[in-house]
Amino acid sequence: MAFDIKICGLKTDEALQAALGNGASHVGFIFFAKSPRNVSPEDAGRLREAARGRAKAVAVTVDADDVFLDKIVAAMAPDMIQLHGKESPARVAEVKARYGLPVMKAFSIREAGDFEAIIPYAGVADRLLFDAKPPAGSELPGGNGVSFDWRLLAGLDASVDYMLSGGLNAGNIGDAIQLANPPGIDISSGVESAPGVKDAALIENFFRAVRAASDRSAA
Ligand SMILES: O=C(O)c1ccccc1NCC(=O)[C@H](O)[C@H](O)COP(=O)(O)O
């Protein structure tokens, strides 16, 4: 595949194997107590061992302090840290320097003006992740299964390295690829049978749809 694929919110060996077996480039582990995908650093450490050398293990955190990040990094040695809260550019730089790891900073998108928020992170974050703004009342900054208008990505400088996320699934990934041709895609609830419950068949279907869309865009 010409782009990266991150399966996020993994909690079980079965789901991890489905992601790896289908060719995920990144596997994400959520450290956020309110999420149905929350895992302990110890469980993530055990799971990430199976991914070593096959996919990058991403630790997903929300405004985590150094004490919690120290614990996560010690327990699972992630390949990348995803900051999915309101972390400032200075905090992103601090996290990068403290752990010597690449950082992916998430941004909530609803309208074109939301992309202005990325400007101060240029040269600081290693990669960006564009997710939809959470619906009113949601306690989760991500993993809400809602999309933003992918046509907004057309206005983005081609040099911006990002992952597209938010409400992707086997039914809409073809349109997303056709409209945005993103350098990476990220999915969580679209491959779940219930909140936090990954489904191996849905993961496989998703990869099948991605491959079909890639073949169409290459033709
Ligand atoms: O997925 C969560 O529960 C979550 C909780 C707190 C912060 C981030 C979270 N997810 C981050 C991701 O990278 C998700 O894959 C992304 O938001 C897309 O989710 P979905 O719309 O369900 O595909």
Image (cartoon, grey):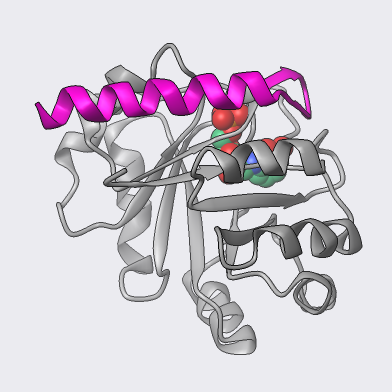
Magenta range: 192-219
Residue 168 visible in the displayed image: no
Asked whether 203 falls inside the magenta stretch, the response is yes
Q: Which residue ends up furthest to the left in the rendered image?
A: 219
Q: Image quadrant for the C terminus?
A: top left
Q: Quadrant of ligand 1?
A: top right
Viewer-proximal residue, 144 or 111? 144
- Please tell me whether residue 170 is drawn above or below residue 198 in the rendered image: above
**Residue shown at the point (77%, 22%) measured from the top left:** 195
| Position of residue 167 measured from the top left corner of the image (x, y, whole percent) | 51, 23
Q: Residue 178, located in which quarter of the rendered image?
A: top left
Overall secondary structure of the magenta section: helix
Location of the N terminus by quadrant is top left
How many numbered circles are shown?
A: 0
Please say whether residue 1 is visible from this viewpoint.
Answer: yes
In the image, is residue 27 part of the stretch drawn in magenta?
no
**Identity of the residue drawn at 34% across and 28% down:** 211
Residue nearest the viewer, comparing 110 with 71: 71
Q: Is residue 6 above or below residue 174?
A: below
72 vs 169, left or right, is right
Q: Which residue corresponds to the image point at 57% horizontal and 67% vertical from the top-left?
A: 53
Q: Is 131 left, or right, of 72 in this rendering?
A: left
180 and 91: which is toward the camera: 180
